[in-house]
Amino acid sequence: MAFELLKDRRSQVVRSQRNEVASVDCNKASVAGSVSQRACTFCGSRVVLYPIADALHLVHGPVGCAAYTWDIRGALSSGPELHRISCSTDLREKDVVFGGERQLETSLRQLISKYSPKAAFVYGTCVIGVIGDDVAAVCRRVEQDVGIPVIPVLAEGFCGTKRDGYNAATRALLTLIGRGDTSSIGKYSVNLMGDFNVAGESWIIKKYFEKVGIDVVSVLTGDGRVDDISRAHGAKLNVVQCAGSMTPLAQGMRERYGIPYIRVSFFGVEDTSDALYRTAKFFGSPTILSSTQALVTEELSRVLPELRSIRCKLQGKRAGLYVGGAFKAFSLVRALRQLGVSVVVAGTQTGNQEEYAELQAVCDENTIIVDDTNPLELAAFLVEKDVDVFIGGVKERPVAYKLGIGFCDHNHERKVALAGYAGAVAFAREIHATATSPIWSLMPRRSRPERARIGKATP
């Protein structure tokens, strides 16, 4: 069947060219009617703050908002799991008419009394933005009485994009950071920012830093603890893994506390090694640099033989990817190239102009670069490029399977860690098992392509 991009979407899709960077229209509200894959502003704030495991997370609004975002990160905790309890004020029609502040205050006091959290985050939803509840005033009043931080997260779903939700989470975290004692923090210390401990990945990265002699003051926010975050301003460097969600926080801490930051990735052996070396070089310690070299050498000698073996079996395969943040996309392109797989479709939900320019630079010529896509567009692009494996999240999985294309889950729900050196091997194994499965040769798209053909999309 023929396919044509919506007129208002054409500026958000480009094809990369050698020695030329095309402008991608991005960081704007989704086009009405396009069935965007992107989540709302409220959801953006929730995914950043949710992994703080010893805090209460209360969604002020209808119960559906809390249900939709329950366990959205799949973030693991080494101790308390208060974050996995989905709490809502469950506003009904009468609350919309008469206001929900009383319901919010009652719910807060009851929940704090029952669970004794270290802090409480209160999320404002679309309904709250419409009826005008003063969430901040309620939070101040309760905080004075209960003696713990009670922090409003004002991120009504309609007030922007998912990236605006990240900014709301940043503002909330900045009200928590700075309250703790930093006297015991050493000179070789970092905050790991933008890792959410999906499948235990924060633990892998923390072990690397511990082995080379660098103290991790806090993880923002995977397996997060309120006390650790409150003393994060004592770290000497912020190591930012998810640039989209955490760069505003790193910039805010640089302005307020003078802490520099670097943007890194711990996905793929190339980016993991680069992240460890850049962190070690920042501190300028010969001992730390030597320990880092030893760690990288040891890990590479362990994983490279298997990666080379898998590369021989994947050479020439083609991949598409659609992920939340652009930095994840960069790492995926590099990791797949190391496996002999070329990326022919690459998109993100929250990329900005600078990030899309960099994405075009790391991709091969004529790669389709897309911002905030929808299922129909994805289907057209994947078929046009004859993709062997598609990498995305839970919303993209049905698109791949309906087309008879292998799928790799790189989103929050996965149970296998893909960070670090061991994660690089796990990712390679999954791509190999998926892309080379004989089942795909039996799909209609392969056996009778004329029956499943989707015409080339025209940007």
Image (tube, rainbow, N blue to C red):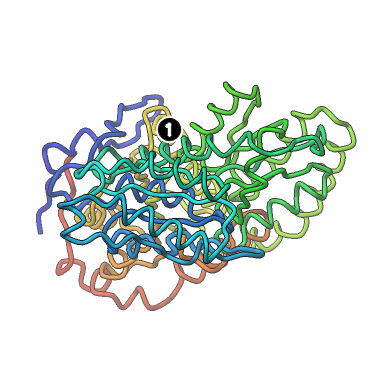
Where 176 sits versus 84, above or below?
Answer: above
Q: Residue farthest to the right?
A: 287
Give the left or right position of residue 38, taking residue 363 as reference. left
Residue depicted at 50% across the width and 45% down the height = 143
Q: Is residue 236 visible?
A: yes
> Does the image show residue 311?
no
In the foreground, 277 or 234: 234
Q: Give residue 362's position: percent from left, percent from top.
A: 47, 36
Query: For the point 33% across and 47% down, which residue is it?
Result: 124
The amino acid at mark 1 is: Glu
Q: Residue 147 appears at what percent x and percent y? A: 58, 47
Q: Where's residue 286, x and y in %?
A: 88, 32
Q: Is residue 413 above or below residue 290?
A: below
Residue lying farthest to the front in this orientation: 145
Q: How many marks?
A: 1
Q: Which residue occupies 66% across, 64% down? A: 78
Return the residue at label 1: 355
Q: Residue at x 47, y 62 (%)?
A: 111
**Residue 203 or 79: which is nearer the viewer?**
79
